[in-house]
Image (spheres, rainbow, N blue to C red):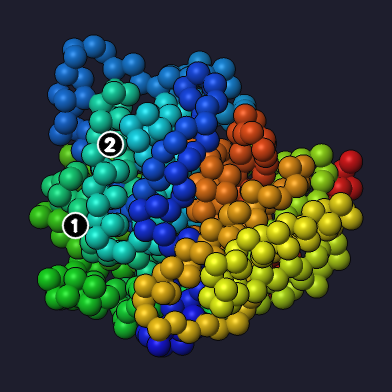
Amino acid sequence: MLGVGWGGNERIRFSSLVGSRGLGLGGDRGWEQAHDNRSRWSRSLFLPSLAALVVAGWNRQNQGAVAADGRKPNGFSWNDRHSRDNDSNNRRIDGIAFMTTPKIIVLDDDPTGSQTVHSCLLLMQWDVDTLRLGLADAAPIFFVLTNTRALPPEQAAAVTRDVCRNLKTAIALEHIHDFLVVSRSDSTLRGHYPIETDVIAAELGPFDAHFLTPAFFEGGRTTRDSVHYLKVNGVDTPVHETEFARDSVFGYHHSYLPDYVAEKTKGRIPAHQVERFTLADIRQGVRDRLLHLHHNQCGVVDAETQQDLNQFAADILATAAQGKRFLFRSAASLLTALAQLPPQPIAPAAMATYVRAGQPGAVIVGSHVKKTSEQLEQLLAQPGVVGIEVPVAELLEHPETAAATLLATVTQQTHAAHAAGKTPVVYTSRTELTFDDVQTRLDFGAAVSQLLMDILQQLPADIGFLISKGGITSNDTLSQGLALRTARLLGQVLPGVSMVRSPDTHPQFPNLPVVLFPGNVGEASGLATVYQRLSSAAALH
């Protein structure tokens, strides 16, 4: 029997199920924002993807291909909102100046890797034309939301290969000569390593080294003496002692990163061959060591503070400028070091500014990890919310009729709550379920995710904001529920919790602020705090 909960390796958390629909994830339609700002409804297969890299210097080895037509590279293109600054090395978005060299391309294995940056584009598709939108955008960084973590290994590898090949074409067409490619993965060591890094090396290599940099300070993840820690109740705990190490898909037994590498590569990379970059190394500078790495050497990187990663990133960029090529499997905090962004335009505590007309919002909770359940409990105790539980077990008991019945019931409840000036909180039932086999489990996860997205699409059109709780749930929210091609990242409403906004051309929810709240991030009060901040918009109207 297979279970849903937080038990041993034979069980799978509900968060691992929601949205797992294989190659069909994201639906067969997408709202596409074209280059000329005209919108069209088009059919497109959404193939989720990737989790694992920084590429530095590929452009240097391929400049001839990039500029094979003999023309002077024309760099970026701009629309009426994103104009050039007088300094050719700077671009502006809404009055904020950004350095644009190098362009940072982030391949994100779930939609939460943008937890440390702001003002950039998130792409829900990775066809060549969509990738060109990201490359041409004024911000120095953009994200491709690939959702690889929700895929089985074979599909993750296939999608990774597709992304890399399309990326090479888009870079050539945009005449981009200075860039990094970063594939962001999980700060608790879950994901398809080394499958994805192997594919990336085959498509974009060769590399001198690849590095594991899992530190994520906003979520309490640090690495010291090559041991990766998660802060639990204020105590640094080796990650192999946490619930994340018992993940039924991505489980592991080691927090000491060289041993983790050996475990995941099944001994292909022995622990003693892993290069360790300790805090002492990082803080005194590692440029000389980086210059002497070859043949895709595996390295693991310590970091306790953002300054540690800032120093490491500076050394990486300096050695990449000398022709070294590196690949990273990274959590979100490294992106802060690479992008070097100014402060976000609206402070986290003031992001109610983005709420539409001061209206109450809606909350969709799909994640089933322990932290989410704790946060949900505090949210439901807040004034102005109406809890709406979705008894998902009915999808197992009555598969022919349950989805339609639940959709009708929940839709009526959400509209009634909104009409009363309340914020509906739609959440999946917390009861642990068991399954006879893997396929039944996967089919159930797909059915639950589809139901949540159907509920989202039936929400009142004038809601002021939307909070999506859970990584896979958030991916589905953007790619299927809202059917977005792109979205603009506004910034962080809490550390590690991003807010994006739908395009003003969206047919149902234009300019809707959407909070992407990972399942395993934040204090117990985190979800309630975000709700309080956004609900304060009513007082502004």
Element assignment for label 1? helix
Identify the residue at image location x=32%, y=79%. 252
Vertical order, 382 against 393 (above or below): above
Vertical order, 217 against 499 (above or below): below
Residues at marks 2 and 1 touching, judged by CB atoms closer than 8 Å? no
- Nearer to me, 522 or 384: 384
- Relative to 432, 103 lies left or right: left
Identify the residue at image location x=87%, y=43%. 540
Q: Is residue 109 visible?
A: no
Identify the residue at image location x=66%, y=65%. 406
Which quadrant of the rendered structure holds the N terminus? bottom left
Q: Quadrant of residue 148?
A: bottom left
Q: Position of residue 178 (x, y in %)?
A: 30, 31
- Nearer to me, 489 or 256: 489
Q: Amino acid at mark 2?
A: Asn
Residue bearing mark 2: 166
Q: Amino acid at mark 1?
A: Asp
- Nearer to me, 297 or 281: 297
**N-terminal label among 2 and 1:** 2
Mark 1 neighbour class, 10 Å CA radius: few under 14, some 14 to 19, many 20 or more: some
Element assignment for label 2? helix
Q: Position of residue 83 (x, y in %)?
A: 53, 19
The numbered disc on residue 198 is 1
Q: Quadrant of residue 28?
A: top left
Q: Is residue 28 visible?
A: yes
The numbered disc on residue 14 is none
Q: Position of residue 348 (x, y in %)?
A: 68, 50
List the single residue furthest toward the front. 400
- Relative to 424, 338 lies left or right: left
Identify the residue at image location x=58%, y=60%. 451
Dot in front, 2 or 1: 2
